[in-house]
Amino acid sequence: MNQTTVNPWLGRLYRDRNTQFLFLQILGWFSLSLISFFSLTLWYNQQSFAYISHTLLQSVLGVAVSWPLRSVFHYLWNKPLLSRLLLTVLSVLACSIIWSALRIGAFLWMTTETDVWADFGGWLFGSIMIFLCWAAFYHGIKYYQLLQSEHEALLHFAAENKEEQLKRSRAETFAQEAQLKMLRYQLNPHFLFNTLNAISALVVSRSSANANTMIMQLSNFLRYSLENDPIKRVTLEEEVRALRLYLDIEKTRFADRLELEFDVDPAAHEIKIPSLLLQPLVENAIKYAIAPAEKGGKISVFSKLDGEHLVIEVKDTGAGIEGDHHSMVSGPGIGLKNTVDRLSAFYGDNYVFELRGPNASGMTIYIRLPLEKQTAESNAELVLGG
């Protein structure tokens, strides 16, 4: 695997503020030497070694004189604005005077010039302009670095916040997965115990053929139940097929006492719903409407599309039970309560689950599910399912 290598000095220049300051000091002051050489030394035809050396020396002196300004400005950084501005101007003026005096002294020492101090004001004015530019560049770079630091801090905070949101989302996803699986595992034993009791009754009554048929039907239903993840959705067509597997068992148990009716809109066949959603509802109807009635009764399953929603109704002809969406906790049996909990886990508050009745024609369970969430929730299933 190829790795990009960076020059160590360049890496240090990028990371180390002290190295940056040294580099900019040398670059800035010796750039001034070049400007002085082309604008003064050549202009006045002073190309001798002494004049050129003085041009270089004044930059070295500029580095030395301006170096303490960094500490001064660092000290003044958190001072009140007026005090900071005043002390900055005084520092610039002091450094300009010192640098001008050193430049003139070195110029007199290195050249044959004698009448230079009389022009001290001109030298000082140029020095003040240069040190004002130095101070402006320093503060500009300082503010830029501060802005960069704040930007990096914001990016770091945003990255940490995003990571925290991802962790929270994963935790919520795993919690929802555990909740759904727990609800599903509560349903399976509930149904299984009822069916085994029915098989036991058939064995006791020596109805071995019916008992054997029911065992095979139970095997088919359990195979389907165990092969389907409770987190995933299945199409309405698959759900109805699974419901028929369950009802095959109950038909063996109740024979002519159980009458069934299905009216499923073909346009709704491919709509996905939580797996084994209908089985506990029909099981509840059998337990409280069909089993207690001497002549049995009828269970009807209707489904249709209603705009952007899927409507499902499970009806029975029994006496029914009293209750509504908010009384499932203390209602009869675990099936209805778990169905409501599963719908809440899948759809939040964006669904309808109602018990309508009882009346002369029996009880109706009414479910209304949104279609617009199918795509988004299918993506959620991919996360839940890994």
Image (spheres, grey):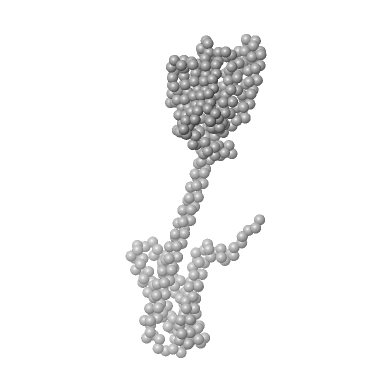
Q: Which residue corresponds to the image point at 42% horizontal and 83% vertical from the top-left?
A: 104
Q: Position of residue 163 (x, y in %)?
A: 51, 46
In the rendered image, the vertical position of residue 49 relative to residue 299, given as above or below:
below
Residue 339 seen in render: no
Q: Which residue corresponds to the image point at 50% horizontal and 83% vertical from the top-left?
A: 52
Q: Position of residue 44 (x, y in %)?
A: 45, 86
Q: Quadrant of the N terminus?
A: bottom right
Q: Which residue corresponds to the image point at 57% horizontal and 31% vertical from the top-left?
A: 234
Q: Residue furthest front?
A: 266
Residue 386 seen in render: yes
Instruction: Give whichever of 268, 51 is nearer the camera.
Output: 268
Q: Could you tell whether 83 is left or right of 226 in the image?
A: left
Q: Position of residue 100 (x, y in %)?
A: 41, 79
Q: Which residue corresponds to the image point at 54% horizontal and 39% vertical from the top-left?
A: 379
Quarter residue 97 falls in: bottom left
In the rendered image, the vertical position of residue 141 relative to residue 93, given as above or below:
above
Q: Position of residue 76 (x, y in %)?
A: 39, 65
Instruction: Give whichever of 82, 386 is nearer the camera.
Output: 386
In the rendered image, the vertical position of residue 59 relative to residue 7, given as above or below:
below
Q: Could you tell whether 268 is left or right of 146 in the image?
A: right
In the rendered image, the vertical position of residue 90 relative to residue 55, given as above or below:
above
Q: Could you tell whether 220 is left or right of 149 in the image?
A: right
Instruction: Give whichever of 134, 265 is nearer the camera.
Output: 265
